[in-house]
Image (cartoon, rainbow, N blue to C red):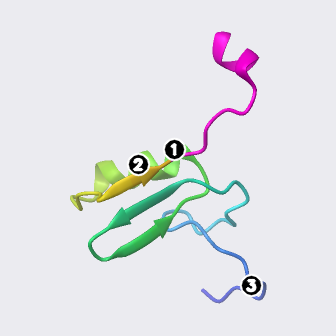
Amino acid sequence: MSHPEAKEYCTLCDQPVEIPGYILNTATGRLRFCCAGCLSLYQLVNKEKPITTTTTQLNNKEDIKK
């Protein structure tokens, strides 16, 4: 599928990546995901071992306490 905009798209579901930070670095390259769910599901389905995983952190400390 071809995307007209110069945006990044989720490796799993092909939706636009609007929240940066859901990245899986593998031996075959850097994969970007739109959410933690897609990142987790990709890891469950694929046997690729991540080199590093980066996820978005909560910015508000009050959200962490809830």
Instruction: Provide the secondary structure element on which disc 2 rests.
Output: helix
* Residue 6 percent coordinates (x, y): 74, 84
Quadrant containing the N terminus in the rendered view:
bottom right
Crowd around label 3: few <14 · some 14–19 · many ≥20 (10 Å): few
From this view, report whether residue 1 is shown above or below residue 58.
below
CA–CA distance in space, label 1 to label 2 = 6 Å
The stretch of residues the image draws in magenta is 55-66
Which structural element holds mark 1?
helix
Which mark identifies residue 63? none
Q: Is residue 57 within the magenta segment?
A: yes
The mark found on residue 6 in the picture is 3
Task: Rate crowding at label 1 as few (under 14), some (14 to 19) or many (20 or more) other CA atoms within 10 Å.
Answer: few
- Identify which residue is drawn at 53% across, 46% down: 55
Residue 37 is marked as: 1
Query: Which of pointers 3 and 2 lies earlier in the amino acid sequence?
Result: 3
Q: Amino acid at mark 3?
A: Ala
Indicate which disc, 3 or 1, sits on the residue closer to the N terminus.
Answer: 3
Q: Which circle, 3 or 1, is nearer the viewer?
A: 3
Report the disc number at residue 41: 2
Q: Separation of disc 3 and disc 1 at Cα?
A: 24 Å
* Quadrant of the rendering where the C terminus is positioned: top right
Q: How many marks?
A: 3
Query: Where does the image place residue 24, in percent across and percent down from the top left?
Result: 42, 59
The residue under the point 35% across, 55% down is: 52
Q: Is residue 44 above or below residue 8?
A: above
48 drawn magenta: no
Circle 3: element type: loop
Residue 14's quadrant in the figure? bottom right
Identify which amino acid the numbered label 1 is placed on.
Gly
Q: Is residue 52 left or right of residue 23?
A: left
Whether residue 7 is situated above or below residue 39 in the rendered picture: below
Q: CA distance from mark 3 to mark 2?
A: 25 Å
